[in-house]
Image (tube, rainbow, N blue to C red):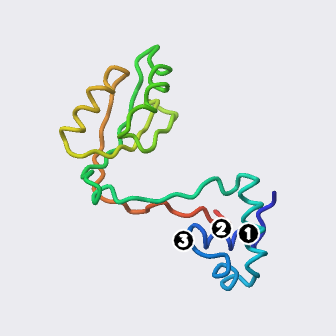
Amino acid sequence: MIVDTLNWAILDELQKNARISFSEVGRKIGLTSPAVAERVRKMEDSGIIDSYKVNLSHQKTGYQLRAIITLRAFTGRLKAFLETVKEFKEVVNCYRITGNENIIMEVILKDQVHLEKLIDKLITYGETRTHIVLSNVIKDGPIVSKID
């Protein structure tokens, strides 16, 4: 499926507010509500739109600490880690990367004690490096139609 100018306009609006009505999107971009609905359905069916979700405030839900943890897996331990990491409830994002480390994770934790317990689990798989997040400069930035 080709993402044309109108589809990008719809995607821009949905990325700002996934709960916006099709009629409101239509008013903003100059289409009827049924036309917007049809385009959204086609983008969902083709996988361009792959989900809708609610973003929670980790701080207001009792998780006061956000950290980025890198892992350099011990020889022969990467596969076991990749199978196990899905069970760690603290991990909200996990990427396999290139470079000296194999893995980078974003984790949400209650406090430093919680962090220590997680690190104790992780060090059985490899060497970790932890970075405490102080603030979020860009949060869930939109994918835009043109990146130069």
Quadrant containing the N terminus is bottom right
Q: Are marks 1 and 3 in contact (CB under 8 Å)?
A: no
Residue under label 2, please give it.
11
Residue 52, percent from left and from top: 57, 58
* Residue name at image x 66 percent, y 84 percent: 28
The residue type indicated by label 1 comes to Asn
Badge 2 density bin: few <14, some 14–19, many ≥20, Cα 10 Å? many
Q: Which residue is mark 1?
A: 7
Q: CA distance from mark 1 to mark 3?
A: 15 Å
Residue found 43% across the figure and 62% down from its top: 138
Which callout, 2 or 3, points at the residue further toward the start of the chain?
Answer: 2
Q: Give whichever of 148, 107 is nearer the camera.
A: 107
Give the CA distance from mark 2 to mark 3. 10 Å
- In the rendered image, the vertical position of residue 128 relative to residue 143, given as above or below: above
Which residue is denoted by mark 3 in the rendering?
Answer: 17
Q: Which quarter of the picture shows residue 112? A: top left
Mark 1: which secondary structure?
A: helix
Label of residue 123 in the image: none
39 to the left or right of 121: right
Q: Nearer the viewer, residue 43 or 102?
A: 43
Q: 122 or 148: nearer the eye?
A: 122
Residue at far left of view:
113
Label pair 2/1, CB-CB below 8 angstroms: yes
Image coordinates for residue 87, horizontal then vertical, percent: 42, 31
Label 2, secondary structure: give it. helix
Q: Nearer the viewer, mark 2 or mark 3?
A: 3
Q: Amino acid at mark 2?
A: Leu
| The C terminus: image quadrant | bottom right
Inter-mark Cα distance, 2 to 1: 6 Å
Write the residue at 35% across / 40% down. 90
N-terminal of the pair, mark 1 or mark 3, is 1
